[in-house]
Each structure stands twice: as structure tokens, then as C-alpha cells.
Amino acid sequence: MTQIPERLRRLLLFARKPSGAAAPAPARPARQGHNLFEAAAVYVAACAEDDQARAEEAANRVSPGALSFGVNELACRALVALARERNEPPLTVARSLLGLRNDPA
């Protein structure tokens, strides 16, 4: 659990664009300019449609850490939207989507 803030810090540093001409060149120039949320949306949609080629192409747009962050953000937003639509708590909806029993806590 203590690694989460460090991982987020590294992701935020990764997402910052270098300013000025003195900034170091990006480590992966082929991935520069791609929106991590766009890549996450394409990746998740491709996985849902069982389109392996499109999922791999989307995964190659951004770093694995950035893709993970984007997929997590997409999952959270989708869960909140679905919970509001169903008028149920997010945990109940999440457990239902995963086929888990809703044990009273």
C-alpha cells in the first residue's frame, strides 16, 4: 500500500511534458503525443470485443504504467456511472459485474 503514492508520483512525472529546449529527449519517442486515456479506451474496448491486434496496438501507444493508470480511471468512471444508473452503491455493482455474492457487511 505504501508503494501506491510512489507509483502515482512516477506516473505524474511521466505525464508532464518537458518545457524548453533544454529538456531531455523522451525515452520512447514513438509513444510521444498519445493520450493515455484514449489508449486505455481503445485497449479496453478491444479487449471487450476480443480484438487482440487492436488491443496490442493501443497498449503500444503509451507506457505500461500509463496504460494501467488509464484503465483504472476508466474502470472507476464506468463503475460510478453504472452505479448511478442502477441507483446502487458502486461496491454492489462491482461485485455483481464480477459475479460475486453481495454479502451484507
Image (cartoon, rainbow, N blue to C red):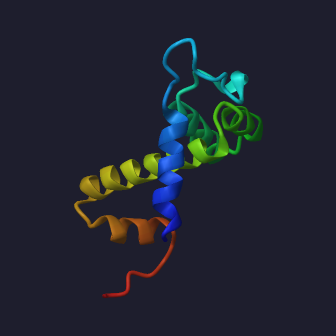
* Number of numbered labels in the structure image: 0
Quadrant position of residue 29: top right
Measuring 31% from the left and 49% from the top, which residue is drawn there? 81
Q: Is residue 40 above or below residue 105?
A: above
Foreground: 104 or 76? 76
Residue 74 is situated, as x and y percent measured from the top left of the image, at 45, 46
Q: Name the residue furthest right.
A: 53
Q: Is residue 57 left or right of residue 77?
A: right
* Residue 83 location (% of width, % of height): 30, 58
Above/below status of 53 relative to 10: above
What residue is drawn where x is 53% and y is 55%? 7
Q: Quadrant of the C terminus?
A: bottom left
- Of the pair 81 and 63, the residue shown nearer to us: 63
Q: Is residue 61 left or right of residue 84?
A: right
Q: Which quarter of the picture shows residue 24?
A: top right
At 48% from the left edge and 31% from the top edge, which residue is drawn? 16
- Residue drawn where x is 39% and y is 49% of the image: 78
Across and down, in percent, residue 9 comes to 48, 49
Q: Compared with residue 6, is residue 52 higher up or lower down, i.e. above or below?
A: above
Can you give x and y, in whole percent of width and height, for residue 40 in the image? 55, 39
In the picture as drawn, the residue positioned furthest to the front comes out as: 22
Q: Residue furthest left?
A: 87
The part of the image, by quadrant, that contains residue 56 is: top right
